[in-house]
Amino acid sequence: MGKAKVRKIHDQQLRTLLCFAIVAASIGVSSSGQPTSTQQARQALAALHPVDAHAHVFQSDPALTRMLEQWNLHIVNILVVDDKGPTRRPLDQQRADALAFIHSARGHASLCTTFDPFRLSQPDFPKTTIDQLNQDFANGAIAVKVWKNIGMELKDSHGHYVMVDDPRLRPIFQDIAAHDKTLIAHQAEPDVAWKPDPKAIDTSYYAEHPEWDMSKIPGAPSKAAVLASRDHLLAQNPRLRVVGAHLGSMESNVDLVAERLDRYPNFAIDTAARVPHLTIQPRAKVRAFLIKYQDRVLYGTDTDIMRKGDVNPSITDLQKQLAEDWRYFATADTFNYDGHMVPGLQLPLPVLRKLYHDNAVHWIPGLATGSVP
Ligand SMILES: [Zn+2]
């Protein structure tokens, strides 16, 4: 760690302390009945040095850097090998795009790398995969992502679905743990991918992406089987830190998440793209869950910014989402979230600090924003 970085961290600590009062004041405004503006949300959130622990950004643009600076936001930038998505580039190109963004973000982003699981049956798979990951770690990657194609798409040479606890993947997870890096695991999908429901939150996604609609794929594994393989991975690798993306794909009920958090001390979850699922569960129950498991939940958005195209609408969307999520987690406002009226959780400030910053730093060591002693 260079001197400049140490000084930056000290500055950050000082600014955090100075901003503490502003945060309390902003929350106070909303609790007294005034609606919380985006400006207030930004001010309150920026004081916490928020981390978006789950995003996919492949474009570098000064407007984006400016926005990250304004919100004091740090992004964990995640690579995904997706052989179905026409917009997702090959791994080497993605990595180059992601690193260019990280460089342009001036300390506001870190890399979560991945590997190509479709090479699984090649004899050199373990070695070349581990070599590639170690190269990424040497270049600053702080985590590794495994995606839903493991469990829901990838098949071996016998035509069997490959699960995340497959013995052929084990040396890779052992190597990640040996390097003290974190695994971000997105296994399974929302319930609606197996049980169509026109009223479900994510129904439109499966209309657009029938390739992930497991209810239409004969022989597809059940959601329970996919989650069981993830649980088995947790049990088999107690020294591997695992962050389960998207509420660990147990979005329908925080009790299911609590059960796993109780059982596996090496497991945490992120909220990426699943805050709407929290807002439709009973307020008191969700609030109690987030307070009880305040050390195990990381804030994330799942923002996706492609390499090409106008970045400004994405910046607007991201700011809107940050403000709305803050309003939900931090304030007592009752407001329209995603088409329905939602009462804010008004979580205590120490819990918000963990959700938005401390847990990311703890569960994904090496974040540029997170090396506070
Ligand atoms: Zn994602």
Image (cartoon, grey):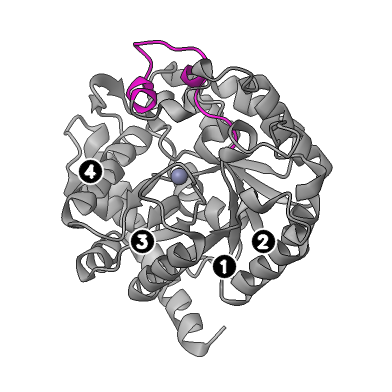
Could you say whether the residue bearing mark 4 is in a helix, strand or loop?
A: helix
Disc 2 residue type?
Lys
**Alpha carbon separation for disc pair 4 and 1:** 28 Å
* Residue drawn at the location 49% of the way across and 42% of the way down: 351
Report x, y in % for residue 314. Answer: 23, 50
Disc 3 residue crowd, few under 14, some 14–19, many 20+, Cα 10 Å: many
Q: Mark 3–mark 1 contact, CB under 8 Å?
A: no
Instruction: Pick the quarter of the image with the C terminus.
Output: bottom right
Report x, y in % for residue 163. Answer: 71, 36
**Alpha carbon separation for disc pair 4 and 2:** 31 Å
* Residue drawn at the location 62% of the way across and 49% of the way down: 118
Disc 3 residue type?
Phe
Q: Is residue 351 visible?
A: yes
Disc 4 residue type?
Lys
Ligand 1 visible in quadrant: top left
Q: Mark 1–mark 2 contact, CB under 8 Å?
A: yes
Q: Which residue is mark 3?
A: 58
Along the line of sight, which residue is nearer the eye, 244 or 126?
126
Could you say whether the residue bearing mark 1 is in a helix, strand or loop?
A: loop
In reply to whether residue 17 is colored magenta, the answer given is no
Magenta residues, start to end = 187-207
